[in-house]
Every structure is written in C-alpha cells, then in structure tokens.
Amino acid sequence: TDVLFISHGSANDAPVLPVTDANGVITDAKGWQTTAPEWRADRYIWQTTYVRKGDGTASFSDPTCIPGAKGEQGPQGIPGKAGADGQPTYTWIRYADDANGGGMSNDPAGKKYMGLAYNKPTAAESNNPADYAWSLIKGDKGDQGVPGQKGADGTQYWTWIKYSDNPDGTGMYDTPNAHTKYIGIAVNKTSQTESNTPSDYTWSMFQGPSYTNNLLLNSAFIYGFDNWSIGSYGAVNTAPMFEGRKSVRILQSGLTANQWRGISQSVPAAPGEVFTASIWSFAENPSSIDNGAEMEVWALNSSKDRIGDAVKRVNIKPSKANEWQQAVAVNAVMPANTAYVQVYAWVRRNGALWLSSPKLERGVNPAPQWSPAAEEMVGTPAQIVVVNADALVFQYENGFATLLSPQKITLSATVQGIANPTYQWSYRQADQTGFTDITAAYGRQPTLEVNPNGECMGNAESST
C-alpha cells in the first residue's frame, strides 16, 4: 500500500490515475509520486491510495484534493480591535513543520505548528519565521487555545481558533477541511478553554475567492446594453476599462431633483434564495457626484413589481479619484412572493460615474471575483488562462549543432471561468503571421520534444 501525490492544476477536476499492467504494477505513473510535492501558486496537491494485493490485482482510492491550496498572495492578517490611539492592529497566522517555523506556509495542510504574531500595525504578513510565536497544533484534541505571550503582569494569555463555512461563524468546528471558508480568531483570552459562541471570534476568509457563476448576462458590456435597462444618460466606454472589460458611464448634470438614473437587470429567483451582488465603480472627480450613488438588490413579484423596500443597498461612490473600487452586497435574502431578483446601480442626482464588471451570484461571498454567465462561456475564450512551463527554451551551442538542454519542455495550462475546458495548443515561427495547431499537443499538459525537422520547430531557431 502506498499513498501517492500529484501537483495538479485544478482543485475540482480530478487528475488521471496511474496505469497498471495485468499484475497490478504501475507502468505509467501519470505524474503521481510517493512524496508530496511542494505547494506552488496556481497548483493543487491531490492524493490517492494505491493498493496492490497478493493475487496481482490493484486498486486506487478516489483522488482527493488536499485542502487549502492557495494562489500567490497569502491571506492578510486578522484585524484586531482598535488600540488606545484608535489604530487597528492585526494578528498574523502562519503554519509550519517544526517549532522554528521550518517550511512556513499559509496553508495548514500537513503542518504541525501554528505561528501567531500579535498587535501588528499592518495586514501584510511577515515571511520571517522569527516574527511568530510557534505552537504545536496537531494533537488529539482541537478544542484548546494556542498559548500566546505572557502579559506585563505575568498573566498567560491564549488565542482561540475555530473554523466555519459561514462568515458569521455558525456551525464552527476545530479542524479545517476541503470546504472550510472562514477562520475565527479570539486573542488575549485568560482561559485555555475555547468558547463555543461564534460572536466571541473575529471571522475572516480562510480560502481564496472562487469563480462562481454570474447570473447577469452581458456583464462585460460586449454587446452594448443588451439585457440591461438604461436611459440615454448612459454610454458604454472603452476608457477607463477594468481588467480589460468595458465600463458604463452614467453622466448627469444640471439636475435639481433626485432621479436615480443607472443600469438594472432582473433574473428569475425564488423566496428564500440568497444572493451576493457586486460591481466596480470609478470616478475622475468623486465630489461631482453631489448626492450619492448606490447599488440595490430588489425582490420582484411575477409582474416584476418591487416587493417592499430594497433587500440590500451599498454605497458605490468611490472614496478616491481615478481608482477602481468594488462594492459588495452580501446575504440578500429573497422574501415571500419573489419571482425575480433585480440589481440596480444608480447615481442619485448629478455627477459622472463609471461602472464595470457587475455580478450577481447565489449564496454568500464576501470577496466575489467577476466571471461571465455560464451560458456565455460556450464557444468563448476562458476568463483566465495561466500557462506554466518547466523550461522556456531549448539551449544550443556551436551554431545550433549541439543541444545542451533540455530534451523536452512540458507545458501546463490552468483555466478559470469555463467548465470542463478542452485544450488546443498552437505554435508560430518568427516569419509567420498566424498560429498553427499542434496535432500532437492536446490535453492540459502536453510535452514538446526536440525534433529539428518536426512540427513546431522545423528548421526554425525560434518558435512561440
């Protein structure tokens, strides 16, 4: 019996299992190995158990993704209460393999120690293990606090840590898992016994944001105002753009009464459903917006009449000039008789405001990331494609007569914003104007081998 590991480009789509022969011996590992690879940005570690029996048969357990793989940027420190001078402080959290902070990581998977640094003036966590107080956390029980530093009077203080799938800590537990989204921290406690009351903790996102389906159509305004309701005061702009997506300018002047002019879209909904709405806004001169700007979430009945007051509303007037800022309306719960949910972003009276990348999604997501509607992903480019390679060039000497290294280059693509993607790799030589599909390179992780007279390179000394 062996536990096998692999570094994989997706946390949702399981990697291909190894291939075995008639005697149960692995003949093609497909990248699986007996030692866990290091965590890397945009990569996820999966594991499976390989069992080979005495009769020659073999089996693999269903692959599971080890929880907690993260992107390049680690989580920010947890904000503490404001100090005597009114300035907030932060608690930094890291995980490690030993009491000295060896193998320090943002990810708790496989780590035995937790490092805490208290009362820090910045949310940006240090990468120096010496800045943290390290405590063993991988024991038989997970319901006792982590010891902190002693106070000036010699009193021992404790830090309580819990995990939850919800931003308010409901349903909290002691050990994180693949579905854990939030971490709760309570510092400077005089008792080692942790509280079971969620409100005693400060809750912060534990896993990075996910790309959930956007219910709004044409949210990048590629097709003008299709699917949107707006008056003549609005226009689609290519400047300023947000992350390469168009914006809508709402421009009003000379008004003496409130008009609430903006953009709106409605989608089917049902009573009890929970939504999160978000939008990005930009203003060259925020003070020109003389009476505010907001985004509202409304419940509509079957006749598309509004039910009561707005379910949620948030301010979308930027606090700084020439800077994109996101506004998020979380936990918009639909009341009885709801047939539609409407997102409505508006300027109340005068001013110039640019809006971009609106999103409406089901569930609670305090840190939404824009993505297109699921039906708009078919036949369109993915939202994000990240390509990595174990090498970038074949190295030669003697006028390309002698190959130094490597013998092959393995490419790897990670796709976000499109479900169950298919892959086609293409190349272009220096004297070509277009790309040519590579017939032998398909799948998420193709390997290109040196072949001076073959596809991709031919006789060229350079190929993209």
Image (cartoon, rainbow, N blue to C red):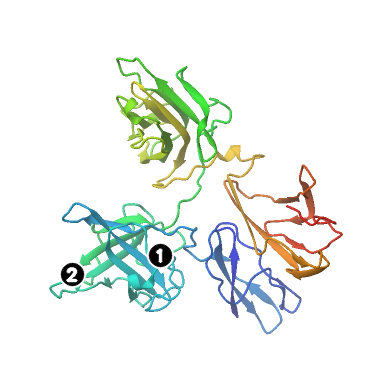
Snapshot quadrant of residue 244:
top right
Residue at mark 1? 176
Residue at mark 2? 190
Q: Is the residue marked by circle 1 packed among few (<14), some (14-19), or many (20+) residues within 10 Å?
A: many
Is residue 273 visible in the rendered structure shown here?
A: no
Q: Which of the two residues, 245 or 344, is positioned nearer the viewer here?
A: 245
Snapshot quadrant of residue 292:
top left
Q: Which residue of the protein is positioned furthest toward the bottom in this rendering? A: 54
Q: Amino acid at mark 1?
A: Pro
Is residue 399 visible in the rendered structure shown here?
A: yes
Q: Amino acid at mark 2?
A: Thr
Viewer-nearest of discs 2 and 1: 2
Residue name at image x 30 percent, y 16 percent:
257
Q: Choose the circle earlier in sequence order: 2 or 1.
A: 1
Measure the C-alpha gap from mark 2 to mark 1. Answer: 24 Å
Residue name at image x 81 percent, y 68 percent:
398
Q: Secondary structure at mark 1?
A: loop
Q: Which of the two residues, 191 or 397, is positioned nearer the viewer here?
A: 397
Instruction: Please give left or right for residue 442 compared with residue 307 in the image.
Output: right
Instruction: Please give left or right for residue 379 compared with residue 82 in the image.
Output: right
